[in-house]
């Protein structure tokens, strides 16, 4: 039966004399030796660069003239052009080689919209996920470790948050905060994070708690307690590292959920305020492209496929990176190569 | 993970989605099965055409032989109705069911003229305050029982009854006593008196009030109006007059309509079975006075245009609605393009400018915005041909349409001039456009504001809101947005419905938009009460000219009905009032050519 | 154990009341009401509107509406109408004449309970969950045991698709492949009687859960593989099969069970997309549309049902923990 050979080798190497490195330096070192993690990091870095430099690749104006490929430029009569490699689309439109992925319903360049979409979606995919990770970890750890009435109250709270209709909550948030500075900050993105994170940490908290319930009864925790470690130390130094795997995976799975949720909220009037200024930073998002694309899957599949491919790539990279991170921070592999 | 939000995605699945690359390949091997039925004896001839060779096999009659294909019209209706009750329904899909099962006193022909249906004739008094219908003799329900005028009396009264509280309760308010009874409380002790005072009377041959539902000579229905209402025979074609049986409603209780056994009707079809959210199956009504249809109808409820389109291509549907995004694809396809039926509908959509809110309190600004609207471009680039440019309030093809009422067409120069002449030239206040947030509306408004910016140089802020919030906002005078798009679809083809119901200063619609024009009111009132048809139309024409002159709204587009209809569905006669499927106005003209079925 | 169950069931009462209160406040704070139908529809006139508000008690103060819904109130004739605590979820605002409980739980005439909307959804949800578990868990385990093998990467690819591609896209692709190309299924099922009609909707519905289950199983397995007691188990010479089944899988199931519990609650309360795409008579559309339509009693009814199921699922999860790891104590 095949087993995790990599680990066994590492374990076998445990007593090899190596220079002591700090936990972090050690983790970095191991992270960079992991091919999957490196590929993941490179892909994420590319998307970050695209997000930052989208306006350099497709500037709103070229030499003072409106750029037909800018994400907000409407090209009359060029709606739903097929991608460049298809001569004639199913709707009878001939392709234009300068629009590589074709155009959307108003004749806007799909490629440039996908690239600009990286800005919103990278932010929306990661920032609430990190907030949820932190809140979920703390509540889950505390609840599971303390047990008793603390656990009972906190877990009933998660039951409540899990069940109440978040759609209604989002609608209320929109009505209450839309016209405040908070609601307008970053084209409405700030409010979005808050609302998303506020109702989505419960899954994470339950998973962490479940892990803690099991781990806190394990020998190494008892050992730590015997030598007089504080609760905080036991929670964060002993239990947390041992429950990281599922937590990291849970977070990786949150990312696409957030990206799509952003678009759905867009249709509750809570999402991104539609940009009209071609120079604004947040213009469109992958989620919005997917939703627009599914109404027109027949005429212009690349609206959907382009955005969906990007989301899948980001998720895949994050999965690889998460795996790598998990290994890198494995307490049992400390000091090994 | 929370799956709820993902579920909401589907709210947004309004239009089609079908993968471009996935077109069904045309099968190379064709099989043609012909069946001839001679006096109960099946003589079957099978012709099998394979690429290259043709074999003809003549089989002797065998028990396993395929019988004649069923003439069945399979229609995707999209959404399952909330309620299938003649006096409570208000949505097109609900009415689609009712129109098959029931028939009113009058009906519309293919030119949208009102023609006799259950009533063989009608007559107005000289001042048009009294309307007398004479029913056809020997009318029968699908179960063979007598249908007399008393049944219609019951239906109209049920529509007025405060306990019914239907969306269309107010449509019969012109009848003497109707508004009073409808306005009373259902628990009111005086209810019976108020009901008795409503001037809807079923009379027998002797002119005496009818006694019961069995009385065969009860053929006269007399309505009295509080003011002349020369259009009312058209109102009587609506579903609110459909004669559902009182005893069935009593037996079935509040949700009697949810079961096929209580739907005994007088329409061309009978509801044979109803499986909520899955299917409704209709068979021809043998007792229908105009004759019996030759096919059955099956309604299905696939609310996803992409699946519906896929099922149509797979020969699982015979008629489906075609989505705007797919029109170009359908037109480019050799087969589908022949099956597409596109024709004018009965709705007008317009941009509304709230005249109480600056800058739209200045008519010059409204005029400038109206003239800066490139309706041709809108229809071509945004609606993808699924609409036609509108220049009038009343749709073309409806009585009362005024062709010369073509003001404020696209004219960028005039638009700029008008804006420069307005009092807001150079100091334009903030303009905010509010809309219900859907993928379609977003792109529509992005296009619109870009065009207004291009022509007028005005920056318009977009304010997408949750769709129900949008409805709520537009219903109150206090919260009405500065600028928005709404439409009006006629209930019945008469200018009274287009104008008086909507724009009269006493109407709830006009009040919401703070629209009031005394001169226009005057013309509409004249039109509503005028018995002479020619003079009547002239009055409505004057009212329309004033409406356009005010530029309270900028007419934008009329909808087009777009349906895909399989070639074996013959005899479809279309009208702008078709709502659920092509030819729904008169399903009796439709036949299914079973020899063409695959 | 019995005492624990009693306590947990009692704890559900405050949870449900709080969920009801939050939902009630949120839905009444949301602009618009049950009579604001979409703008293309005919709106109620003022007279009828007043009548409707009286009928549904919307003219009463909010606190009274809330207590009337949850506990009960006297109607205009002086009779006491019991509220949600008696299982009366109120009259629907959209389908007038029917109560929420009859819409959700009453089967069509002459049919058993599982032909009701909730029954249909529950059956589909269970199928979907079975599909997710039966495929997801073995894939996760196998991927973890064969880490970085080709199988692991294929599994990763498929699960990534399941997580990142919205299910309406998956549904339409499957419909095209199995309906239009292979002609294996009818795109519009003729009937929901044959089990074959349920396969595609259950697969589409369960795919996301499958992907999550597989990833979670894999991650959790990798976590367990590294633990000392696995090494101990091996060291004491246990057969590899026993180590995997008795020690690894059992311990690795804790996070998986944690996510599956609430997932089941979500799956059995219906899936709007599946229902609209496959013409499936479940309750998901009620759940989603009621919010858009501000069908107050339906929002309350579906939310309370969901809250109850979530609480029940989480309780079951806590009990399953004890079976998976006997050292966990029910507090």
Image (tube, rainbow, N blue to C red):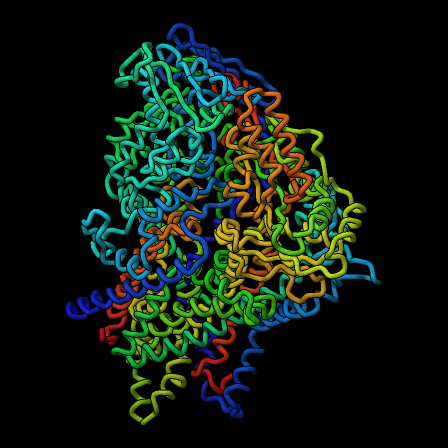
Residue placed at 41% from the left, 76% from the top?
Answer: A137
In screen coordinates, is C75 left or right of B244?
A: left
Q: Nearer the viewer, residue A298 or B576?
A: B576
- Say above or below: C243 vs B309: below
Residue A329, given in percent of the width and then of the height, sits at: 48, 80
Image quarter in which the N terminus of chain A is found: bottom left
- Say above or below: C279 vs C23: above
- Say above or below: B566 vs C162: above
Q: Nearer the viewer, residue A118 or A27?
A: A118
Quadrant for residue C5, please give it: bottom left
| Residue A103 seen in render | no
In screen coordinates, is A273 left or right of A101?
A: left
| Residue C279 seen in render | yes
Quadrant for residue B219, please give it: top left
Residue B212, given in percent of the width and then of the height, sits at: 26, 18
Query: Residue reaching furthest left?
Result: C2
Query: Residue reaching furthest top?
Result: B39
Q: Nearer the viewer, residue B120 or A221?
A: B120
Query: Residue reaching furthest right?
Result: A63
Residue placed at 37% from the left, 10% from the top?
Answer: B137
Residue A310, given in percent of the width and then of the height, sits at: 60, 60
Number of callouts in the render?
A: 0
Residue A274, given in percent of the width and then of the height, sits at: 62, 59
Residue placed at 43% from the left, 83% from the top?
Answer: A332
Residue placed at 30% from the left, 81% from the top?
Answer: A146
- Say above or below: B43 vs A331: above
Q: Nearer the viewer, residue C241 or C132?
A: C132
């Amino acid at each position: 039966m095949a087993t995790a050979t990599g680990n066994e080798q590492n374990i076998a190497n445990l007593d090899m004399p190596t220079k002591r490195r700090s936990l972090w330096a050690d983790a970095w070192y191991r992270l960079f030796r992991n091919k999957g993690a490196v590929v993941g990091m490179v892909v994420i870095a590319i998307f970050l660069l695209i997000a930052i430099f989208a306006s350099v690749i497709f500037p709103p104006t070229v030499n003072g003239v409106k750029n037909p490929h800018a994400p907000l430029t409407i090209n009359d009569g060029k709606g739903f052009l097929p991608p460049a490699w298809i001569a004639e689309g199913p709707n009878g439109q001939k392709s234009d080689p300068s629009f590589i992925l074709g155009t959307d319903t108003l004749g806007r360049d799909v490629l440039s919209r996908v690239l600009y979409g990286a800005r919103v979606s990278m932010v929306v995919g990661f920032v609430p996920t990190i907030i949820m990770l932190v809140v979920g970890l703390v509540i889950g750890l505390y609840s599971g470790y303390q047990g008793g009435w603390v656990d009972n109250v906190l877990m009933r709270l998660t039951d409540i948050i899990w069940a109440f209709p978040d759609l209604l909550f989002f609608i209320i948030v929109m009505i209450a905060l839309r016209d405040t500075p908070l609601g307008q900050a970053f084209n409405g993105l700030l409010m979005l994070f808050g609302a998303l994170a506020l109702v989505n940490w419960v899954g994470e908290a339950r998973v962490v708690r479940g892990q803690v319930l099991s781990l806190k009864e394990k020998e190494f925790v008892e050992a730590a307690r015997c030598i007089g470690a504080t609760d905080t130390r036991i929670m964060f130094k002993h239990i947390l590292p041992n429950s990281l795997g599922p937590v990291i995976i849970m977070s990786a799975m949150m990312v696409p959920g957030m990206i799509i949720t952003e678009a759905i909220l867009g249709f509750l009037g809570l999402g991104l305020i539609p940009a009209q200024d071609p120079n604004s930073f947040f213009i469109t998002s992958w989620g919005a492209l997917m939703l627009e694309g599914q109404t027109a899957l027949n005429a212009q599949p690349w609206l959907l496929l382009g955005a969906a491919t990007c989301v899948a790539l980001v998720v895949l990279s994050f999965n690889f990176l998460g795996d790598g991170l998990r290994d890198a921070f494995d307490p049992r592999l400390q000091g090994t190569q | 993970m929370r799956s709820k939000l993902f579920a909401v995605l589907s709210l947004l699945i309004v239009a089609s989605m079908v993968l471009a690359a996935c077109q069904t390949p045309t099968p190379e091997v064709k099989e043609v099965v012909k069946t001839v039925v001679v006096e109960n004896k099946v003589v079957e001839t099978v012709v099998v055409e394979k690429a290259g060779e043709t074999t003809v096999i003549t089989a002797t009659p065998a028990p396993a032989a395929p019988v004649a294909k069923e003439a069945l019209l399979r229609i995707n209706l999209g959404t399952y109705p909330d309620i299938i009750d003649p006096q409570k329904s208000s949505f097109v899909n609900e009415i689609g069911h009712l129109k098959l099962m029931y028939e009113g006193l009058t009906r519309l022909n293919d030119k949208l003229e009102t023609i006799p249906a259950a009533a063989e004739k009608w007559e107005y008094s000289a001042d048009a305050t009294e309307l007398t219908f004479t029913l056809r003799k020997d009318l029968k329900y699908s179960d063979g029982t007598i249908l007399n005028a008393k049944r219609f009396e019951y239906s109209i009264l049920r529509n007025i009854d405060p306990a019914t509280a239907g969306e269309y309760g107010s449509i019969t308010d012109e009848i003497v006593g109707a508004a009073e009874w409808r306005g009373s409380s259902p628990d009111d002790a005086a209810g019976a008196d108020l009901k008795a005072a409503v001037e809807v009377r079923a009379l027998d041959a002797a002119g005496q009030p009818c006694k019961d539902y069995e009385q065969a000579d009860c053929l006269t229905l007399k309505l009295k109006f509080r003011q002349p209402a020369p259009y009312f025979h058209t109102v009587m074609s609506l579903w609110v007059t459909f004669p559902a049986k009182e005893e069935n409603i009593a037996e079935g209780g509040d949700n009697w309509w949810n079961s096929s056994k209580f739907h005994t009707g007088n329409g061309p079809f009978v509801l044979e079975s109803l499986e909520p959210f899955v299917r409704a199956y209709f068979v021809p009504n043998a007792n229908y006075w105009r004759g019996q249809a030759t096919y059955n109808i099956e309604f299905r409820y696939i609310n996803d245009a992409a699946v519906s389109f896929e099922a149509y291509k797979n020969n699982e549907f015979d008629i489906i609605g075609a989505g705007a995004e797919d029109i170009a694809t359908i037109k480019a396809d050799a087969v589908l393009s022949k099956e597409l039926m596109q024709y004018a509908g009965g709705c007008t959509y317009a941009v509304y400018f709230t005249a109480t809110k600056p800058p739209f309190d200045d008519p010059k600004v409204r005029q400038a915005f109206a003239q800066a609207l490139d309706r041709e471009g809108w229809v071509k680039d945004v609606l993808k041909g699924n609409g036609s440019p509108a220049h009038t309030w009343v749709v073309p093809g409806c009585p009362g349409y005024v062709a010369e009422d073509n003001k404020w067409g696209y004219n960028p120069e005039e638009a700029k001039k008008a804006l420069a002449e307005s009092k807001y030239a150079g100091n334009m206040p903030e303009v905010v456009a509010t809309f219900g947030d859907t993928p379609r509306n977003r792109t529509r408004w992005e296009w619109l504001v870009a065009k207004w910016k291009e022509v007028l140089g005005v920056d318009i802020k977009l304010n997408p809101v949750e769709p129900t919030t949008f409805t709520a906002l537009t219903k109150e005078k206090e919260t009405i947005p500065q600028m928005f798009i709404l439409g009006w679809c006629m209930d019945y083809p008469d200018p009274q419905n287009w104008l008086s119901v909507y724009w009269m200063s006493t109407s709830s619609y006009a009040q919401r938009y703070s629209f009031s024009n005394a001169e226009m009111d005057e013309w509409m009132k004249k039109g509503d009460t005028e018995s002479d048809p020619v003079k009547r139309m002239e009055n409505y024409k004057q009212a329309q000219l004033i409406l356009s002159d005010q530029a309270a709204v900028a007419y934008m587009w009329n909808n087009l009905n777009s349906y895909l209809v399989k070639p074996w569905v013959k005899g479809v006669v279309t009208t702008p009032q078709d709502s659920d499927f092509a030819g729904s106005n008169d399903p009796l003209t439709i036949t299914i050519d079973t020899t063409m079925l695959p | 154990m019995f005492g624990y169950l009693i306590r947990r069931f009692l704890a559900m009462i405050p949870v449900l009341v709080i969920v009801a209160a939050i939902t009630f406040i949120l839905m009444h704070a949301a602009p618009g009401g049950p009579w604001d139908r979409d703008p293309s529809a005919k709106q109620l006139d003022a007279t009828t509107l007043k009548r409707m508000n009286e009928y549904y008690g919307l003219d009463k103060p909010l606190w009274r509406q809330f207590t009337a819904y949850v506990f009960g109130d006297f109607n205009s004739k002086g009779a006491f109408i019991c509220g949600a605590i008696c299982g009366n979820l109120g009259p629907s605002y959209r389908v007038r004449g029917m109560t929420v409980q009859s819409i959700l739980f009453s089967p069509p005439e002459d049919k058993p309970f599982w032909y009701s909307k909730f029954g249909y959804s529950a059956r589909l949800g269970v199928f979907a969950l079975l599909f997710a578990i039966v495929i997801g868990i073995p894939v996760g385990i196998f991927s973890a045991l064969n880490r970085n093998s080709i199988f692991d990467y294929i599994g990763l690819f498929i699960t990534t698709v399941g997580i990142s591609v919205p299910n309406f896209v998956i549904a339409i692709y499957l419909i095209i492949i199995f309906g239009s190309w292979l002609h294996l299924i009818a795109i519009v099922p003729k009937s929901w009687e044959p089990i074959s009609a349920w396969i595609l909707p259950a697969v589409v519905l369960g795919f996301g859960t499958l992907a999550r289950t597989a990833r979670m199983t894999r991650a959790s397995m990798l976590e367990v593989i590294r633990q000392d007691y696995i090494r101990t188990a091996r060291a004491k010479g246990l057969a590899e099969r026993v180590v995997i089944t008795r020690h690894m899988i059992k311990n690795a199931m804790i996070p998986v069970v944690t996510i599956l519990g609430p997932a089941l609650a979500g799956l059995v309360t219906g899936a709007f997309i599946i229902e609209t795409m496959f013409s499936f008579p479940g309750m998901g559309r009620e759940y989603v549309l009621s919010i858009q339509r501000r069908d107050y009693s339906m929002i309350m009814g579906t939310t309370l049902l969901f809250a109850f199921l979530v609480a029940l699922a989480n309780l079951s999860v806590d009990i399953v923990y004890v079976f998976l790891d006997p050292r966990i104590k029910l507090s």
